[in-house]
Amino acid sequence: MSKQISQEQVNRAAWAACDTFRGTLDPAHYKDYILTMLFLKFMSDLWEDKAEEYATRYKGDETRVQRALSRERFVMPNVELKDNDGEVIESFPASFGSLYERRERAGIGDLINETLVAIEDANRAKLEHVFRNIDFNSEAFLGQTKDRNRRLKNMLEDFHREELSFRKANVGNLDILGNTYEFLIKNFAADAGKKAGEFFTPPEVSDLLAQLVEPKSGDRICDPTCGSGSLLLKVADQIPDGNCALYGQESNGSTWALCRMNMFLHERDSATIKWNDTINNPQLIEDDALMKFNVVVANPPFSLDKWGAEDAASDKYRRFWRGTPPKSKGDYAFICHMIETTIADTGRVGVVVPHGVLFRGGSEGKIRQQLIEENLLKAVIGLPANLFFGAGIPTALMIFDRGKTDDKVLFIDASREFDKATNQNVLSETHMDEIVKVFKARKSKDKYAHLASLAEIRENEFNLNIPRYVDTFEPEEEIDIGAVQVEIETLEAELAKTRKQMGSLLKGLNL
């Protein structure tokens, strides 16, 4: 019996496989190759497990084995290589093992592409376009032929290691694989700098946001800027029985593909993840209207320039009836979209925003005022600076709730609640627990939270800047001038005595 491989071993081996590309390719790009290969390895090992299981069950009856395999989550077909006349010159199983056996081939990049296309075609309902954005024969990213072949050969050999065998006997359950995928995405984000925001929200922020929107069994949950899907999965994890439907949209093609793979690795095969620009071309449509959700969460791009303001007035879905956000800052475009896609009377929205969203004037100020007067805003939570890779600015969470039972807004200042890590600040479980506790209690707490009335917010001209509501000022300790004077006089006397002793010593030395 094989020895079970630990989560740490798998994570370490998968991260080591990135060495092939480090120093030659940006992490924001090589993540696509590593994560796609991880997914291919998962499918191949799963297929081998099932093939052995059915061969034993049906005592080698190949017809029954193949029939059973055809009903599996993924079908692994054969790859057929043809000559210029269309004649098949080679056929082999579309699997990681087949590619590993052919790793010395001069055209290994093309073979990987052909294998992925064959798998995509055989699983069109689930995998259509998932692999088409990733080119393993790209000279621009992987170098000229000799270097490209060497790198891909090294990568195949890295993934052939025992620690990256996802056969059931080795890993026990698929949670390890899903966890490794998330581990890699987080580490890629740490290396990718400013580009990290395109595909990653720190897990602590995702955890916190997931708790604040309070998802329930049976909910439809959406992330309109879903990146690699981690935030969606965190929200789903909050539901004990896991009964929910996940939806997302992502504008970046390769990131959309990673999200699709991430859903499969977490056994969320039914998740609906669309590819396109959410503001300019929303894809989650039902009966020619925007699909409605119980929960909508997002970490949209901060203050996106050229988001499509010129077409806002003619938006067929009337998402911007409260006003058109400035063309150079799309924050409220995403917020308005999210609110318009929630179910009336019960929908909840959780969104990560830069602090400017809370106080900027102009059209943003008018939209903010309208949202407050509609009594949709439930809470504003200030987070510490430097939580996000590539963005050192402090951020905030805005929670909207169509089912609010009062007309107040809770302000929480958690900006000082963090632990220092190597390059980032992080929220600990203790910090998150305190935020959630105060949020649910919905009461003021000295120097931490304030439950503001609508009258207070009006008095502040609908400015939501947190220090206007939460006073965190700590008065300096009162100084006893008399005691300080006595201490100074004592120190001066001691200094005079010391100088006198030093003078005697130097005199004795004839210096």
Image (tube, rainbow, N blue to C red):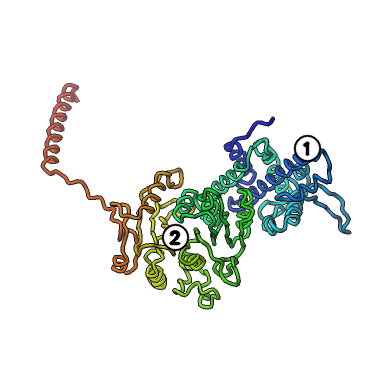
Query: Which numbered mark, 2 or 1, is in the foreground of this view?
Result: 1
157 in relation to 212, above or below = above
- Residue 456 occupies quadrant: bottom left
Say what amino acid the circle numbered 2 marks: Val
Residue 240 percent across, percent down from the top left: 52, 48
Mark 2 vs mark 1, CA separation in Å: 55 Å
Residue 44: give its label: none
Element at badge 2? strand
- Residue on which the image places disc 2: 353
Quadrant in which the N terminus is drawn: top right
On the question of residue 151 being in view, the answer is no
Spot the residue most to the top.
Answer: 508
On the question of residue 339 being in view, the answer is yes
Residue 383 percent across, percent down from the top left: 40, 53
Labels 2 and 1 touching (C-beta < 8 A): no
198 in relation to 311, above or below = above
- Residue on which the image places disc 1: 56
Q: Is residue 384 left or right of residue 104?
A: left
Q: Earlier in the sequence, mark 2 or mark 1?
A: 1
Q: Residue at x 53, y 49 (%)?
A: 237
Q: Residue at x 60, y 68 (%)?
A: 286
* The one of 33 and 438 positioned closer to us in this rendering: 438
Say what amino acid the circle numbered 1 marks: Thr
Quadrant in which the C terminus is drawn: top left
Estimate how packed mark 2 is, as few (under 14), some (14 to 19) or many (20 or more) residues with alpha carbons within 10 Å: many
* The one of 493 and 312 positioned closer to us in this rendering: 312
* The one of 382 and 268 positioned closer to us in this rendering: 268
Estimate how packed mark 1 is, as few (under 14), some (14 to 19) or many (20 or more) residues with alpha carbons within 10 Å: few
Q: Residue at x 78, y 45 (%)?
A: 105
